[in-house]
Image (tube, helix red, strand yellow):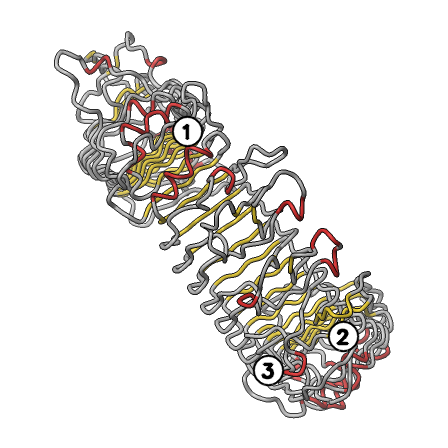
Amino acid sequence: MTALRHLYTHGCGNLEGLPPKLGQLTSLQTLTNFVVGTGPDCSSIGELQHLNNLSGSLVLSQLENVTEAIDAKMAHLENKKELTALSLRWTTTEEEKPNCLKVLEGLEAPYGLKALRINDYRGTSFPAWMSMLPNMVELHLYDCKKSKNLQPLWQVPGLQVLCLKGLEELQCLCSSDTLFSFPSLKELVLVGMPAFDRWCEVNWLQGEQVMFPQLEKLSVKKCEKLISLPETAPLGQSCGQNCTEIWSPFAALKILKLKDLESFHGWETIKATRGHQIMFPHLEKLSIRSCQELIALPEAPLLEEFCGVHYKMALSAFPVLKELKLKKLDKFQKWGAADEAIQGQRHIIFPCLENLSIGYCRNLIALPEGPFLHELCGGDYGKAHSAFPELKVLELEKLENFQKWGAADEETQGQQIIFPCLENLSIDSCQNLIALPKSNIYESLGLTTLPEVTKLSSLEIIDSHQQIFLAAIPRVIDSLSKLVISFNDAAAAALPAGAFELADSSSIKSPLTSLQLGSNCNLLFHSSALALWTSFVQLQVLRIQDCDALVYWPVEEFQSLVSLRNLEIEDCNKLIGYAPAAPGQPTSERSQLLPNLESLNIRDCESLVEIFNMPASLKTMEVQRCPELKSLFGKQQDKPTWNQGPSTDVMASTAAVPELSSSASWDRFLPCLESLFIHECGSLSEVVNLPPSLRKIDIFDCDKLQLLSGQLDALRTLDIGWCPRLRSLESTSGELQMLERLFLWNCKILAPFLSSRPQAHTYLRYVTIRGCPGIKSLPSSLRQQLGSLDDNVKYLDLSPGAKLLKPKTWKYASCRN
């Protein structure tokens, strides 16, 4: 073994130590995890002394077992010149370990190390060698809960990634009053540091020096005492423009995430510099969440000083921002620190923003008004304002007081607020918002007559006022591909005359492919909405939920849905089935609906008695918790006649099983149905006329079900449980030749149905039968088949207590009373 070069021990969570005399493997080049054990049967850390050929990454774990500094020094880590990454791990403990600092000092890393990770260290400070690694690129300190001070890490010239998590007593990054800067740092992560309240020990004015000149990504979470970002400095010529009057804490930052900062409320710390106009010139993504004291975004400078003359009347702190998320900011209400003092034509703008998501900001009343678009983009925009000229996605959620689309008075004569590139709009639970922008709704949504204007393709109005939907739908229906609506008022709004009147209802064919109707969408089943349904010829997915207006199957509304593939109906508790037939009209004349439907899912419709006549295209059918359902397949096919004859089932049975007449035309009844799923339909007494295309049947908790029948030659999976009255399962062929899985549970009077003909069930692999006393045994040929299967194939086995006579090789399937 002395020639061993690579030893991989990572991922061995229960490993308590390595064998003794590991140090004799002097040719070892790879050792992924050295676990420091205790006792004579484990290698001590001193065994690393002569393993100087180690390269790549090395983890030292259970370092709490190293109690003396001299033992740590014996490892001679500094001599392992080929190591690039070192991880030092103590076992999690709340106690401060004696000599922790001395031990860590003895574990001095090699000079050329690039990445260092320290976990669960319990010392109060760190050794000096940490700031003397000139090639170190990454430093990760995790759960060093007693550490109060850091070494001067800014002295590490190549440090690019610094991640500090769970340093619960650390108050700042710098404990010196000397000017400092992290010259190469690109990513900084600060998480779970409740004592961290400032960036440096003493608040001093940085002057023209930026603390993090190259930082591109900053994430700060759960630092409850932190009140602001680091000190700002003039951008100067660093951004390529004349920005001497524009200040920034991060000249190169691209991604900023702030989360769970209970005290954070300012964008700069020192009072002497407050009031400066702040810019994040390269920030592309900004996420602020659960910062309860934050009231406003920073005061923004004029963009003409940064972006040129086209923005001479616009203010922005985020000239290249593309994604902005503001969530759970209870006090947030202003889009700039001084926006209440903005006068004249100076308005806030986010010139490159494409995605805006705002949620749970209870004090936010409005979006920024924005400058006149014609000043920014040219063209015939007239008096149109926009703070978001490039916005594509807008999400508003749980904004209790939000009521305006712009901070200024929207009723100013001739002025409009628009979103010229908006594609996706979602409004969720905004109780005080009763309309989209008031003037010319189609222009407000970007549906203008101007050239090259993107049309809205997705609209979600959830738990909000019906007026928003009524105002928007006539103007956007010719562009939407997705529509989701639910309303907060159970009483239908008074429908104005022509509420759903389209510009040219005879020719408009909506591109809508997905429609979700949530709670209180009764107005969609008002007679005046029929023109709207007529345009849904491309609709493929329809979901209807909690609609009390749905009492009978909406035959007229469904008539135009010729492209529908997927239909879901849930919690429509007043839905019964078909409307009563007109006098003299037979039920057989009911028209077939949804000619291309492939999937039907009906759940929790407590009054449903019958399902509509389904098309031949149906592939999957799921019906759950419909306690009054009596007819699964409606009146669409008369039952085939039965011929009494001898049973084809040769298993032990007390009654003959009837055969289906060969005259029954099975292929014309749901010929594509492959999966049938029925749960908790307590009034359903029979499921008959099942087609030969079925591959899977899953039926549970149907208390009154007595008969299951059809042509089941292709069935592969049969799962039935808790159907105490099920007496018969019948197939026209008498055999389930393709069956692979059989699960029967608590079907008290179910008669045997498996064939005893040799090779009748060649594919059957999984068998579970329990609580079915009517099935007293399995055919001998089937027992032999299951008993001879290869041991590597797994089966459900409920053999304990089974009353089944079986051969010695029988292992995998059982019957139990």
Q: Which residue occupies the foreground of this view, 768 or 367? A: 367
Q: Which residue occupies the foreground of this view, 643 or 411? A: 411
Q: Amino acid at mark 1?
A: Arg
Percent x, y of residue 463? 35, 49
Q: CA distance from mark 2 to mark 3?
A: 19 Å
Disc nearer the start of the sequence (1/2):
2
Q: Residues within 10 Å of mark 1 (few under 14, many from 20)?
A: some
> Is 627 situated above or below 161?
above
Say which mark, if any, is on residue 210.
2
Q: Do the residues bearing badges 1 and 2 touch, measured as CB atoms within 8 Å?
A: no
Say which mark, if any, is on residue 309.
none
Percent x, y of residue 351? 65, 52
Q: Do the residues bearing badges 1 and 3 touch, measured as CB atoms within 8 Å?
A: no
Q: Amino acid at mark 2?
A: Val
Give the residue displayed 49% in from the left and 62% down from the top.
Answer: 327
> Is 83 situated above or below 284?
below
Answer with the quarter of the image where residue 314 lies: bottom right
> Is 236 situated above or below 652?
below
